[in-house]
Amino acid sequence: MIAESSRQQASRSLSTPGLVAMGMGLGMAAFELRYGLVLMRLGGIGRAVVLVCAVGFSVWGLKELIAGWWPALGSRGFTRHRSGFPVEGRVYLLMMIVLFAGALLGRSNPLLLVFSAMAGPYVVNGWISFVLLKRLSVERKAPVRIMAGEPASVEVVLKNGKRWLSAWVMIMRDRISGPGEQLTAEALVPRVPPRGERRARYRLKLAKRGRYEIGPMSISTRFPLGLAERTLAVESASSILVYPRIGRLTAQWQIRTQAATDLVPHRSPRSGPFDDEFHKLREYRPGDDPRAIHWKTSARRDELMIREFRESRDRALTVLVDAWAPARPSGDDRERVECAISFAATICVHHLHNSRESHLTVSAAGDPGIDWSSTQGRLEGLLDQFALYAPTSNDDLEALLASLNGRLSARSRLLLVSTRPTEAGQRLAEQSGNGAADSRRTSESIQVLAADPEKVGSLVDWRTA
């Protein structure tokens, strides 16, 4: 069965049943010790029964409060099993309390008999639910990596280790904790046969990049009457790494890139006829360099054939990410930061998929930052760093540019994706006029891209990846 995840704002919760049970227990004990009403009517044995029930209510209520306020304890110790009251159970319990109070104050045996008849199904429901949760185990199969904004499916396998008894109407709840949000997912399994297993799925759609922790999981049931709910906490933890959103570069990006490439001066690395990319074989023409003659083909075809080369358009690419944000960022600041990260990741993916063997270098200052080269790892490693990248409010632009000195080839293309393009352009102009030779060459050849959602929207199609 498939279920959707829902958002929650807080991980802690105050257990209403626990609070009510603890209040009832303390109230019963205080009332009896103060007035001795049960002692006068039922004697010492009746009073002992009431006090034992009061202590039981108080201890159970305290356990529920601890398990709700400290969820990490929910899968260990005495808080592993929890109880709850649905709306129907609360109404039923209120009716029982009214009948018991009326029978006690009015000395009415018929009311006490009705109370006993109503208490029987309540106790039976709790006991059956407790038995059904015994010897249950769960296994979660979650994806290791997903893309932000893309739906993902998590499979949950519920196993019943009991020999004779089936597990009925089991609700599995999973807690998903990520950067700045808490989610709860549910999946329903109608029946698990003895010594059998059943599979269920729930869908996740995580909007923010980063690492999400899944677990602990809980298994609940209200079977058979729905008056009481028993919950079993299970230690089952896993994690999902969420990549930044990846789009598809549009034709406008190709036009802009070609225009910027033609305007940026660069030194030609060609020192001879064999330094560029081989294109084709053709007939020899007067004026061609004799060193380019392909002698084997010429002998086979009985005419001079020459190797023709052309300049490769696949230049090495270096991407710098300046995802600066103030110490107290606003919502727009955070949006620009995520836009810069997604835009840079999209450029890198596009380059690696379409530029054959050209080199790619990515660098970004942060905690943690990004320092990746295509000669050192796969695309997954780069996207992992993008997912965990945490920008800071420190002004690291000069240090980011200085890290490139001595690492660039003559045909390297430089892109700076910045959340502050105007300031970055001014810094580059100052460095071009006052810096050393390497710094001036770097500053003159760099192309600044603004991480503005409206401007990026014309260059990237976010609907497809």
Image (cartoon, helix red, strand yellow):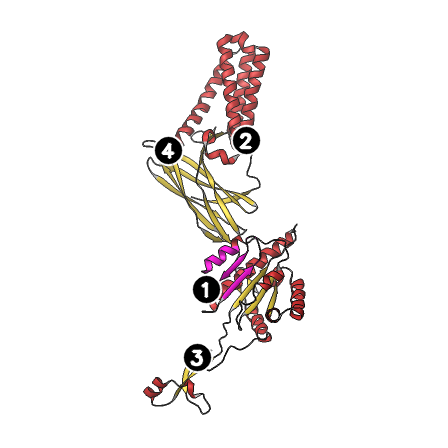
Q: Earlier in the sequence, mark 3 or mark 4?
A: 4
Q: Nearer the viewer, mark 4 or mark 1?
A: 1
Q: Residues within 10 Å of mark 1 (few under 14, many from 20)?
A: few
Q: Earlier in the sequence, mark 2 or mark 1?
A: 2
Q: What type is the residue that disc 1 sits on? A: Thr
Q: Earlier in the sequence, mark 2 or mark 4?
A: 2
Q: Nearer the viewer, mark 1 or mark 3?
A: 1
Answer with left or right where residue 377 lies relative to residue 453.
left
Residue extending furthest toward the front: 436
- In the image, is residue 145 above or below residue 250? above
Residue placed at 65% from the left, 53% from the top?
Answer: 326
Q: What type is the residue that disc 2 sits on? A: Ser
Q: Nearer the viewer, mark 3 or mark 4?
A: 3
For the N terminus, give its image quadrant. Answer: top left
Relative depth, front residue between 255 and 434? 434
Q: Which residue is mark 3?
A: 279
**How many discs appear?**
4
- Asked where in the image residue 139 lies, by quadrant, the reply is top left
Answer with left or right where residue 318 lies relative to residue 436.
left
Q: What type is the residue that disc 4 sits on? A: Arg
Q: Which label was assigned to residue 135?
A: 4
